[in-house]
Amino acid sequence: MLYYLFEYLSNNFDFIGEDLIQFTTVRTGAAFILSLVISMLFGGKIIERLRRFQVGETVRDLGLAGQLQKQGTPTMGGIIIVMAILFPCFLFARLDNVYVVLMIFTTLFLFAIGFTDDYIKVFRKNKKGLSGKFKILGQIVVGLVIALTMLYNNNVVIRMEAEKADQEGYRVVERFISKADYDRGTEIALVKTTLTNIPFTKKGGGMKYSDWLWFLGDNADKFAWIVFIPLVIFILTAVSNAANLTDGLDGLATGVSGIIGGVLVVFAYVSSNINFSNYLGVISLPNAQELVIFSACFMGACLGFLWHNSFPAKVFMGDTGSLTLGGIIAALAILLRKEWLIPILCGIFLAENLSVILQVSYFKYTKRKTGEGRRIFKMAPLHHHYQKLGMPEVKIVTRFWLVAILLAVFTIITLKLR
């Protein structure tokens, strides 16, 4: 909204600082600061409201140290995170941008699913919450909307030289002569394609999902959706649920998500900047600069929420927050064409998810073979395994954060590691 206000003032009045709002870096910084402040300052008032409405966490005794002390701690704190993401986004981002519209839709839709789940648990006293099939259905809807928009909306395009676009046979949406310093005078094409970046390869152009359908020959591009849509749905569902599993210790999921958010800010800026994307050999995404602002809001909201969620937590995010955080991370990675970096960037989420899958699978297998189920870990998800080993909660969370930082740095390095 402020973007349009400043644009109006610059067009109609001699307004001091009228051009500042046009700079993505200025809006990104302002959005980050505001989201951080909202999480920290207004979060306390929301926590008091949650206490007043007796929105307390019900803890199931698993024999973990300090677990029962968390009984009654306010939950549904994801409200704070979502508010701190959306309010600065509404103020500083361009709301007519297709990427911003998709991210707002993703945030609100997944927030509604998580909120409903927590509401059933807290107010209906049903520990199972929202049925798993309804959660999955909601995540499928979000993934479907994102995939279809990327496939068929002409505002979601990739920038490349027109000569290359013609050689590769891409569907060109628009052609123009570049005014950028490094390729001034070059004919540029905006194309529709499922092209995505592949890490650790010298092939800067990336890979098309239609390449997986090589056996269809010239018709492969027409049927790329057969591969692309299920993959997008799978990624969004997997990351969203993995973030939900990770939210088991004070500050764990929040801190890891904030670290991931910082990497997404870098990716969004690099991908949307013509000079950086050309230098680093990554896919150039026109209009994606608004994702820099959204990613900054996301990072600020997560780090600000740590003010209340760090040990000992005054509030838990609940499914209201965890499902939303995971979905946002997946959606941003997909829109930025960096989905193949998710296993590295979200390595903590992946480890937590795999620990549950391995634990359940091995238990069922050994029970079928020997009649007695055995376990790989003392408890899953993985963070509970370390709790069972007697490691203090703060130490577990801190070490997981450090691993997340290492993975984040390595993910950024992949931009040049080709």
Image (spheres, rainbow, N blue to C red):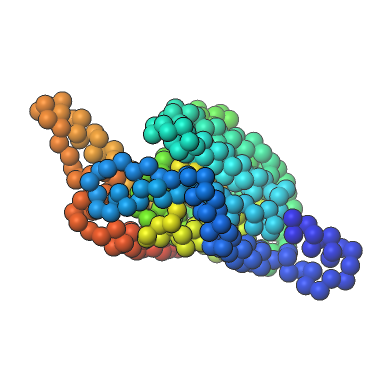
Image location (x, y in percent) of residue 178: 71, 59
Question: In this view of the protein, which residue sits in the foreground, 54 or 199?
Answer: 54
Specify the quadrant that holds the N terminus.
bottom right
> In the rendered view, would you say 208 is above or below 82?
above
Q: Residue at x 61, y 58 (%)?
A: 293
Q: How many marks?
A: 0
Image x and y of residue 69, in percent = 32, 52
Position of 382 with respect to 341 (left or right) is left
Q: Is residue 418 left or right of residue 38?
A: left
Seen from the viewer's position, the closer of residues 129 and 51 is 51
Question: Residue drawn at (68%, 59%), measured in percent from left and top?
Answer: 92
- Residue 245 shows in the view: yes
Note whether 372 is above or below 180 in the view shown. above
Report the residue that reaches farthest toward the front: 52
Q: Position of residue 373 (x, y in %)?
A: 15, 32
Q: Is residue 391 above or below residue 190?
A: below
Percent from the top left, x then y, of residue 389?
18, 54
Position of residue 325 relative to residue 169, above or below, is below
User: What residue is at 49 percent from the left and 50 percent from the top?
Assistant: 51
